[in-house]
Image (cartoon, grey):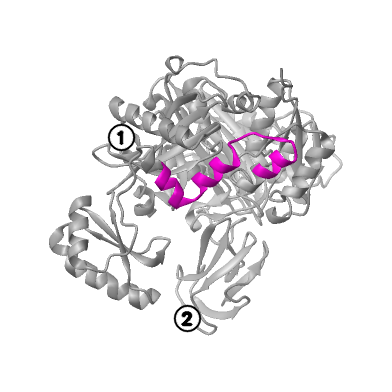
Amino acid sequence: MTKKISKILIANRGEIAVRIARTCREMGIKTVAVFSEVDRKALHVMMADEAYCIGPAPASESYLCVDKILDVAKKSAADAIHPGYGFLSEKSHFSAACEKAGVIFIGPTPSAIAAMGDKITARQIAAKAGVPTIPGTTEPITDFEKLKKTAAEFGYPVLLKATAGGGGKGMRVVTSEKELQSAFEAATREAEKAFGDGRMYLEKYILNPRHVEIQLACDAHGNGLFLLERECSMQRRHQKVIEEAPCFYLQDDVRQKMATAALNLAKEVGYRGVGTIECLVDAKQDFYFLEMNTRLQVEHTVTEMITGLDLVRLQIDIANGDKFKLKQKDISARGHAIECRIYAEDPENNFMPSPGFISAFRAPEGPGIRHDTGTYSGAEVSSFYDPMISKLIAHAETRDGAIQKMRRALTEFTIAGVRHNTQFLQTLLNDDTFCRGDGHTQYLDQHAELTKPSVSKTRTDPHLAELISAVVAHHESRNQKPVTTVAPNTNSVSNWLRHGMREGLR
Amino acid sequence: MTKPLFDIVDINDNTYSVIHDGKSYCFVVVKNQDDWQVFNGGISSIVAASGKEKKPRRAGAAGSGSTNGGTIISPMPGRVVKINITAGQNVAIGDAIIVVEAMKMENEFKAPKAGVVKSIAVNVGDSVEGGAVLVMIE
């Protein structure tokens, strides 16, 4: 019988390092934290059993240093490393280096990470596994007749993409065949002028696509489990803002098809661990492979809420070589969960990061609310890393119930010292399109007006302005040094106020 | 006529419970540069130190990318990827001035006020630190 993992080095920081440490503690596994010089006071450091500094602030000199991390693993005698998300989690060379150093990498094999990390091989493997991919040409098309034929095969609308373009530039949507010729000629001219290369590819264009992802878990014995799906269409510039589970509008037969395709893909690549297959879904509920993330995702929390599973525990069990005791029939969705990502950023200023020190921090609590954070009152939101403050999750019997809970929770969240997106999130939670579930991946980018604070009920309270003034005046007087030697007032209500109230009552 | 008096109770250093006409409020007051930021029900407003409420500030508030009137400062370390203006150029409020790439995201800084570009402290390709002055507009 092989020895079970008894000490895990968490090669990450912030909320995910805290979250991983919690499961380790529940399982009686010792934790080793690594931190950069600016993270000395971080929550993940305080929550771990051991902690080691691995370098100065820049990630390239600390959290991304494979050698330094493996040195700490050796020094602390950690038997396994959990890479979290981001940083080294999807670097196949890190997975390989861990193997070489005799430390268990809590994640897939280097070859699986590498295969899915390359866009081209990932598409090829997906196609081989029978997962539909967005129809597209593999070579530029110069002959117009061939272009017309290919476009007809794909079905309109289609997307002309400049070979030399990128990041959304050099793309043109064509909605019907009669537009194709002029669009092709114009796009070629534009690309030639902008990039010095007029060659064009053709792809099927998915109008108002929705982002639906499949959560999988695979043990080291060839068993794969479908852990339901997540809906993540609310994105701003390809960054997820709100995530949900399950995807309430997905038809059952589509869900089954996606699950089967995903499990085939995992098998094809010899996958081990938890992983997510991201897809685009069109209006007809046809789905197309986007990419596979070979790690735990930020939004794994909503899957945990509806399935009742602990995905980090599952990762550790898989890494221990355990065979799944859980069967597919045991997995079902209970209620609906929504996650809001709380960031230290300024929605009214282009979502510019807003690092700084948190001067006040009170997070929501109560039934159906989960709060995952790596920060606390007085802590610094560093300018060197992702400015995530927290993940706020609401879980209720229905989607409407989860929305109501999230709105309530957001009113309880007080964060001062940095700008943050809680008011923006509240606007979204009250947006008709979001509430109907009609959002798509372009929606937020198309509606910049959502970043403007909406007028709320509280703001129509006629006394509010007066009360705020009075509270500020009171706060200022408390913070002033006393000018006469008067015995300190140990009561919570000042004598002046008490006198005034008495007078007012006469 | 007597001034209205409110039942304000101190909860801790910055938190107050107020009951007025039977309605219950909870306020958190924190410093925001030279003013106060008051939180209530997840919404905050900026109050000048004199005690009069005014509209929440945009440019110049703690943590945003532009402070001190016309100075554009990068709040985080990154790399300058695009400069849209030249020294001496007239700009209008909201014009795209400079783009800094950080954390794989492009952050575009807009002109906090109308004016003339006084100086550009960086070149495209430069690495900048958190707090670095990028462009000054006067």
Q: Is label 1 or label 2 in front?
A: 1
Question: Which chain does tag 2 point to?
Answer: B
Residue A119 magenta:
yes
Question: On residue A46, which mark appears?
Answer: none
The image quadrant where one finds the C terminus of chain B is bottom right
Residue type at tag 2: Asn
Task: Where is residue A421? Give x, y as percent.
Answer: 51, 46
Question: On residue B90, which mark appears?
Answer: 2
Q: Name the foreground residue: A388 vs A142.
A: A142
Q: Residues within 10 Å of mark 2 (few under 14, many from 20)?
A: some
Looking at this view, name the residue that lies furthest to the bottom: B88
Q: Is residue A122 above or below residue A497?
A: below
Looking at this view, name the residue that lies furthest to the right: A485
Residue type at tag 1: Arg
Which span is picked out in magenta? A96-125
Q: Which residue is mark 1?
A: A436
Q: Name the foreground residue: A40 vs A309.
A: A309
Tell me what residue is drawn at x 44 percent, y 38 percent.
A277
| Residue A262 seen in the current view | yes
Tell me what residue is drawn at x 37 percent, y 66 percent.
A163
Question: Which chain does tag 1 point to?
Answer: A
